[in-house]
Image (cartoon, rainbow, N blue to C red):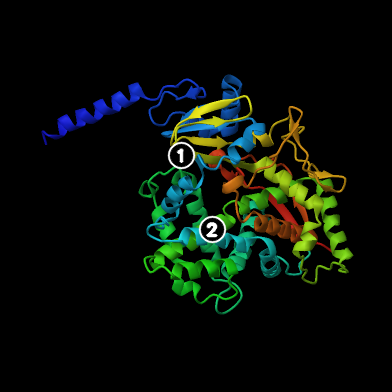
Amino acid sequence: MSFLLPLLISLLLGLLLWILRGRTRKPGEPPLVKGWIPFVGKALDFGKDAHKFLEEHKREYGDVFTVRIAGKYMTFIMDPLLYPSIIKQGRQLDFHEFTNKVAPLTFGYPPVLRTAFPGLWEQIKRSFQLLQGDHLAPLTESMMGNLMLVFRQDHLNGESDWRRGSLYEFCCSVMFEATFLTIYGRPATGVRHGGMDRLMNDFHKFDNMFPFLIAQIPIWLLGRTLAVRQKLISYFLPQHMAQWTNTSQFIQRRAELFEQHDELKDVDKAAHHFAILWASVGNTLPATFWAAYFLVSQVEALKVVRQEIVDVLRDSGVDFSNSSDIMLSKEQLDKLVFLESAINESLRLSSASMNIRVAQEDFSLRLDSDRSVGVRKGDIIALYPQSLHLDPEVYDDPQTFRFDRFVQDGRGKTDFSKDGQKLSYFLMPFGSGSSMCPGRYFAINEIKQFVCLLLLYFDLQLEDGQNRPGLDPSRAGLGILLPSSDIRFRYRLRSV
C-alpha cells in the first residue's frame, strides 16, 4: 500500500498546479469568467437561472464573454444582430462534433463513425427529409386520425358533465400515444399498444435525468437511470417493431439503413429508435402544454382561435359537430394564422434552447464589420435565444402572452427589430442553421392538431385559486422548459 501515497501526492500536486495555472485571457479574446470552483466554474449559478445569469454578465462584460461551465469554456454571443455571423460560419464552427459525442452516451448506441459505418451518418441525415415537404401530408393525416382515436376512446364518451384533470398530464397522455402511433405504427392486433402508460412513465423517468446525461455525467451515477434506459430500448428491438403496422416512412427508412450494417447489434438499432422517441416528444409535450395553457387562461384568445378553426372548416364545407370525427389537412392548418401566432408566442415564453458550435481551431471570429474576437480550438460558441425572446426592445411587454403578437394585417408577422435594425432571427425555439430541428414542421403541425381538437370538442376552464405555473430551470439550454407545477382544469363535451 506504500506506493499509493506518492501517487496520491502526485495527483494532488497536479490538480493544484492545474487550478493555480488555469486559463488566462489572451489579447483579443472576450472577457473571461472562470468562477472560483475548480472545473465547475459558474455551472451552479448558470443552472439556477440561466437567463438571469447571462443578463447580469451581459451588463457587466458586454455582448460577448467567455464563461467556464463544468470544465467547458463557453463564449456567449448576446447581441441577436450578431447571430448571422455565427450561424453562417460553417468551416471553423461545427455542431455535429458535439452531438456525435454526446448523443451516443445519452441514448446508449455506438457512435456512427464514418470509418466503422461508411455512409451511414449521411444516410441517416437524409432520412429526416421524410419529416418535411410533401411527406408532411401523410404524417399529418395519420396524426389526425391517431389524435381522434385517443380523444374519442378516452375523453369523448358522450358525457356532458364536467371532468377534472391536470393539464400537463392530460396533454402528455394524449400527445405521447398519438405521436407514438404516428411515428412507429400500431400493434399487430388492435389499434392501440398495451402498456402505453408504463412506457410513458419510464420515458418521464429517463427524461428527468436527461440534463445530467447531456452534461456527460456517467449514467451509472444516476441511480436506476441505466435500468430505465435499457427497459425503454428493449421496447424497440427489431423483433418487436417487425410486428407493428402503419409505421411511418421515416422509421421504415431508418430500420432499412440499420439492417444494412451487420456491425450494429439489435440493441444498438433499438437504441437509435429510442433516441427518435425522445426527439419526437421530449420538447413537444411541454410545448403542447404551454400552448394549451395560455389559450385556456385567456378567454379572448380562446374565443378568437376557436372561431378561426370553425371558419376554416366551414370554408371547406364542413359544419362541425361533436358527434363526428374531423380531419384537418396540412393546407387547412396552414390557414390558422392566429393559432400559429398563439403557438409561436407560447414557444417564445417557454423555450430556453442553446445554439452551440464547437471551434475547430484557434482563430479570429468575425462578429461584424468592426469587431472580431479570438476563440480557441475546442471552445463552445453559444447563442442563448431566450435572452432575445425576452428582450423588451424586440418584444413589447415580453413577459405577457399576446396570442396575436405574430399576426400583422391578417398574415404572419416576421418584422422585428433591435437598435433600429431588422432582425434576421427573432424566434428560435428549434435552433438555427445546421443545428435546426429537422422535425420542426411536424412538431408544429401536431401541436396545431391537438389544440384544434381540444378547442373544438371541449369547454375548458382553469380551476380557481391557482397561480401561473413557473418555468422549471433544470432544462435550461435544452429546449422547452417544463412547468414547475401542473395546473388543475376541468373540461366537458361542448354542445355544438
- Side (left or right) of 146 relative to 5: right
Q: Is residue 482 visible?
A: no
Residue furthest to the left: 2
User: Considering the numbered disc 2 on the image, is that residue within a helix, a strand or a loop?
Assistant: helix
Q: Residues within 10 Å of mark 2 (few under 14, many from 20)?
A: few
Task: Return the residue nearer the eye: 192 or 345.
Answer: 345
Identify whether 78 is placed above or below 425: above
Q: Considering depth in this image, is 452 or 490 the residue closer to the camera?
A: 452
Q: Residue at x 44, y 74 (%)?
A: 239
Q: Depth check: give the residue in front, 382 or 389.
A: 382
Tell how many labels: 2
From the top left corner, tell me how far across and down residue 312 is, in percent.
Answer: 85, 61
Identify residue for label 2: 125
Q: CA distance from mark 2 to mark 1?
A: 21 Å
Side (left or right) of 13 relative to 84: left
For the C terminus, the quadrant is: bottom right
336 or 200: nearer the eye?
336
Query: Residue shown at 63%/32% (left/top)?
Result: 82
Q: Classify 10 Å Cα crowding around label 1: few (below 14), some (14-19), many (20 and above).
A: some
Residue 162 position, x and y percent, is: 75, 59
**Residue occupied by mark 1:** 360
